[in-house]
Image (cartoon, helix red, strand yellow):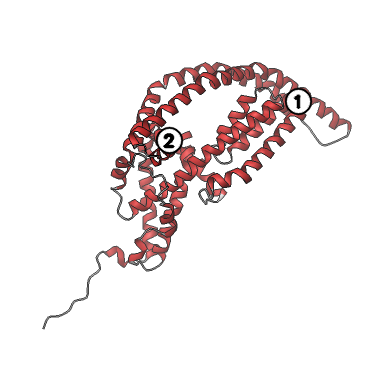
Amino acid sequence: MTETTEPKSSSWLSRLPRWLVVALAIPLIGLDGWVILQGLNYFDSIISALILATVLAFLLDFPVRFLQQRGIQRPSAVLIIFLLALTLIAALAITLVPLILLQLEELINHLPDWLDAGSRQLQAFQRWAVVRRLPVNLSGVIQRLEESAPEGIESFSLQLPNVVIGAAGGLVETVLVVALTLYLLLHGSAFWQSIFRWFPQPWGNQIQQSLRQNFQSYFVGQATVALIQGTTLSLAFFLIHLPLFLLFGITIGLLSLVPFFDIVGVLSVSLLTALNNVWLGLGVFFLCLVIDQIIDNAVSPRIMGKLVGLNPVWIILSLLLGAQILGVIGVILAIPLASTIQDIIEHVYPMATGPAAPSDLAAPPELAEKDAPQAVNLGVGSGS
């Protein structure tokens, strides 16, 4: 008679408690993260160019797909959209950029007078408070403003030419980004699939699907909202005859690309305006507040839907961590990457706390729904 033997476990790891496996994985993940961080710091310029090109290709892929749906072959659609994008950028560089630089120079020239006016207004308020015996002491603020402001303006004026020269010196990186963007539009699908092929399946497909949806929701939605907000505020500032309306409106619009940063722009513009005219500064603040609320409640939900589903605290922490690791590029990538990590953790946690079943390895329903035919994947160069 042949004896039947019990099947042995395929791995000693499967005999360990799930919580212990997770506990052992945490320090390994931390070590891997440190190694990745060192690599990011070493190849910072190359990685930044690749990330920026990926974002641009991701945004341009929407009109490319629109032309594909109208029967145009992808290479021709890519060429049309790419040339249109370059033409639009050139037109903006010829028209808007000189105006913005002119208004920036005007801001530097007028800022000393505005600071003097702000100091006089604080002194008048201090005298008013003393007469009414209010416990207000602004002498330290006034003195600090009078002492530090001229130095800050002089330092900014000296550094501005260096910034312009540095931007001109980045021509090589600009050409690299343009070339990478074109390549990703044409052949991005094969490039990203070759990277995700190294991930164990089905995790590779799951990560790609999650990144696809989160990047689509975030970058396209934020860019659209920022464009609407910057344009609307610039027009509103022009109608109320606000000095430097274009510089202020576009600055707030650019800052709104990152969650919660638009309020920084609103407060900065309001304070600068209030230095010269308190009531105008308050009017600017409330005008920005009203427009921001209209966009947040009427426009953003229609464009972005449920963006990433992150708690605001996690959003702020993600932004801080991204800024620490990759600077501005890290801030741009922080939210969609954090949302992707959240999707993966939500799928891994049930597997780590309960018995593993074959069905557990399938992509979760919410990620399957995200993989709709209209969704744009990271391989933005997929054919028609």
Label 1 sits on residue:
277
Residue extending farthest to the right is: 131
- Where 7 sits versus 317, above or below? below
Residue 158: quadrant of the picture: top right
* x, y percent for residue 186: 33, 35
Left or right? Give the position of 202 relative to 3. right
Q: Nearer the viewer, residue 220 or 176?
A: 220
- Where 376 sits versus 183, above or below? below
**Camera-nearest label, 2 or 1:** 2
Q: Nearer the viewer, residue 360 or 9?
A: 360
| Amino acid type of the residue that numbered disc 2 sits on in the rendered structure | Leu
Compute the Cα span from label 2 to label 1: 43 Å
Residue 159 appears in view: no
Which badge, 2 or 1, comes first in the chain's sequence? 2
Left or right? Give the position of 357 relative to 123. left
Label 2 sits on residue:
60
* Label 1 SS: loop
Q: Are marks 2 and 1 in contact (CB under 8 Å)?
A: no
Q: Nearer the viewer, residue 349 or 212?
A: 212
Q: Badge 2, how many Cα within 10 Å: few under 14, some, many 20+?
A: many
Residue 40 appears in view: yes
* x, y percent for residue 288: 67, 35
* x, y percent for residue 108: 63, 18
Q: Badge 1, how many Cα within 10 Å: few under 14, some, many 20+?
A: some
Residue at the image position 63 percent from the left and 37 percent from the top: 263
* Label 2 SS: helix
Residue extending farthest to the left is: 1
| Amino acid type of the residue that numbered disc 1 sits on in the rendered structure | Asn
Residue 96: quadrant of the picture: top right
- Where 131 sits versus 304, above or below? above
Q: Nearer the viewer, residue 109 or 372?
A: 372
* x, y percent for residue 255: 56, 34
